[in-house]
Image (spheres, grey):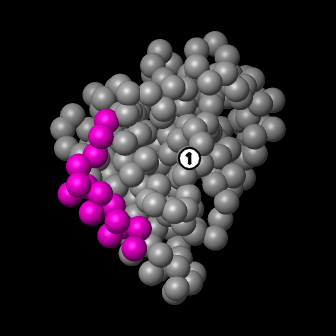
Amino acid sequence: MTQIIQAKDIDLRWLIDKFGLQFVEDENFFREWQDNLPEITDIEKQYLDKIKAGFVNLLNYPHLLEDVVRMAVLDPLLFLAELYLQPFYVRSEESIDILTEDEGVIIKGKIDVLVLKDQFWVMVIESKRASYSIEAGLAQILAYMLGNPNSENPCYGMITTGGTFVFIKLVKAQTPRYALSDIFEVRNRGNALYDVMKILKHICNVI
C-alpha cells in the first residue's frame, strides 16, 4: 500500500534513510555563493536598503506571515535580480509529488516559489514566518529539490524568513548530496541583502 507523506512533515533523518542524502562539508562543492560574485549598483543598493527598512518596520507589527514576507522581501528581490524576465519564469504554489525508489512512498507538497529556465528547475524558494528558524524549512526544501526531474545539473535553493537567508546546492547523481552557504542576517550591521543579491545574480549566470 502506498504511503503519502506531506513535505512539511518530513525531517532530515527521513531523507537520509530514504534517499541516501548526504551533507557535503567540502568547501569546493558549493563555491557559487562565494566566487566571482558580481558587483551591484548604487541604485540597487538604495533599493535593497528600502527593502531592509520595510522588513524591519514590519517586525513592529507581529505576526509576520509567509505571504507578507513574500510581498515585502522575496518578490522585490526576485524582481531586482531579473528572475521575472526571460529566460526565467516564476510559478507560485506549485504542487509536487515525489516517488521514492521503492515506490512505497509519495511525498506531496507545494513549493512557495519555483523559478524555472528551459524546463529546468533553477531555484526553489521556501519562505517561512519571520519567527521561524531556517531549519524549519530545510528538510522540506530538500524534499522538493529531490523532485527535480533533471538529475544531470545541480539544483539551487534558498530559504528565507525575510530576515534570514541561506542558499542550498543539491546534486542528485546516484547519491544525492547537498551543501549550504553561510547564513545571512538582515539585522546584522550593513545590509546582508547586498550579499544575497550578488549570489542570486551569480547563480542566474551559472545556470
Q: Where is residue 94 in the image (x, y as percent from the top left)?
A: 43, 49
For residue 98, what is the image quadrant?
Answer: top right
- Give the tally of numbered discs: 1
Seen at 45% across and 81% down, the residue is 57
Query: In the rendered view of the protein, which quadrant contains the N terminus?
Result: top right
- Dot 1: what SS? strand
- In the depicted structure, whether residue 31 falls above or below residue 79: above
Q: Residue sitting at 26 percent across and 38 percent down? A: 88
Q: What residue type is labelled 1?
A: Val
Magenta span of residues = 38-53
Q: Can residue 187 be seen in this view?
A: yes
As drawn, the residue found furthest toward the bottom would be: 61
Q: Does the magenta stretch include residue 129?
A: no
The residue under the point 29% across, 57% down is 45
Placement of the C terminus among the 4 image quadrants: top left
Q: Quadrant of residue 22?
A: top right
**Residue of label 1:** 166
Query: Which secondary structure dominates the residues rendered in magenta?
Result: helix
Q: In this view, does 26 lie above or below 54?
A: above
